[in-house]
Image: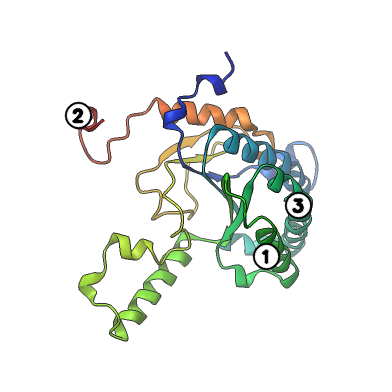
Amino acid sequence: MSLEHQLDIDNIPQHIAIIMDGNGRWANQKGKARIFGHRNALDAVKDSTETAARIGVKHLTLYAFSTENWKRPRREVSALMELLVSTINKEVKSLNENNIRLRAVGDLSSLPDVTLNGLKRGIELTADNKRMDLTLALSYSSRWEIINATKSIASRVKEGEIGVEDINEELFSSYLSTKDMPDPELMIRTSGEMRISNFLLWQIAYSELYFLEKLWPDFRGEDLVRAVLDYQNRERRFGMTGDQVKVTN
C-alpha cells in the first residue's frame, strides 16, 4: 500500500506551513555556491505543492524569505529575487492546470519592483483557482506582523472606532496578514533545526510541529505525506484532557 493510501482522508490538515531550510548547506555539501541550493530547491516546492493539493490540503504556506534574510550577502539576495520571478513565470501554467491559487504575505512593499510586479502577475493569473491556496511568505516575520496589527488596532482605538474592551483574539487575528486562512494545523521544518524562526508565531499556538533532518532540496511529496501520517497519529487536545477529547469526538 502506498503512503498516500494510508492517509485518513477525513483528517487531512487544512493548512500546512513549511519552513524550507537547508538550501545553503545542501549546496555547500556539493561544493557549490548557495544559490545552487536555492535553484535545486524548486523541485521540492513543486512536488510538495502538487502532493498537498492532491491529498486535499486547502492552504500551503511556504516560508520563502524572512525580513532577516535581507541581511544576507547582496549577491545572494539579488539572485533569490530573480529566481522568484523566473519561477513564478515558469510555474503559472502548472498552477492553473492544478487549480492552485498563488498568494503572498509579508512586507511586500520592500520587494524590488521587478520582483513585486512578477509576484502580482502570478497572483492575478491564478486568482480564479480554488483547489488550494499556495501562499509565499516573503519579507515576512511574525514580530513585524504582530507589531503592524497592534499599530492598526491602536489607531482605531485612538480614533474611537473601537473600544479597548472590543480587543480579543478574533479581532487581533483579523488584522494579521493570514486573516483569510485558518491557522496551520501542521508546521514542518526541514534540515534538523528545531526552532520556529519568527514564522507565524500567533497562528501556530496549537499547531503540531514536525521536524526532520532532510535538507529542503531533498524534500519531496512523500516526505509531506509522512508528516501528515505522523500528524494523524497524534492526539490534539487544545488544553483539554485526553478523556475530554474522546468525549467531544
Disc sitting over residue 87 in the figure? 3
Residue 180 in the image, given as x and y percentages of width and height: 46, 58
The label on residue 247 is: 2
Q: Quadrant of residue 23?
A: top right
Residue 222, quarter of the rendered image: top right
> Which-is-in-front pick, marks 2 and 3?
2
| Distance between the alpha carbons at the discs numbered 1 and 3 | 13 Å
**Total marks in image:** 3
Secondary structure category for the residue under label 1: helix
Q: Nearer the viewer, residue 70 or 83?
A: 83
Q: Dot 1, how many residues are within 10 Å of its Cα: few (below 14), some (14-19), or many (20+)?
A: some
Local secondary structure at mark 2? helix
Residue indicated by mark 1: 120
Residue at 38% across, 55% down: 202
Q: Is residue 36 above or below residue 165?
A: above
- Residue type, mark 2 in image: Val
Cα separation, mark 2 vs mark 1, equals 47 Å
Label 3: how many Cα within 10 Å (few below 14, some 14–19, many 20+): some
Could you tell me which residue is drawn at 72 percent across and 68 percent down?
Answer: 117
In the displayed structure, 50 sits above or below 164; it is above
Give the percent coordinates (x, y) of residue 53. 59, 38
Residue in the picture at 19% in, 32% down: 244
Q: Hey, what amino acid is under mark 1?
A: Lys
Depth order, front residue of 56/32? 56
User: In the image shown, does 133 or 26 lie closer to the viewer?
Assistant: 133
The answer to whether residue 65 is visible is no
As helix, strand or loop, the secondary structure at mark 3 comes to helix
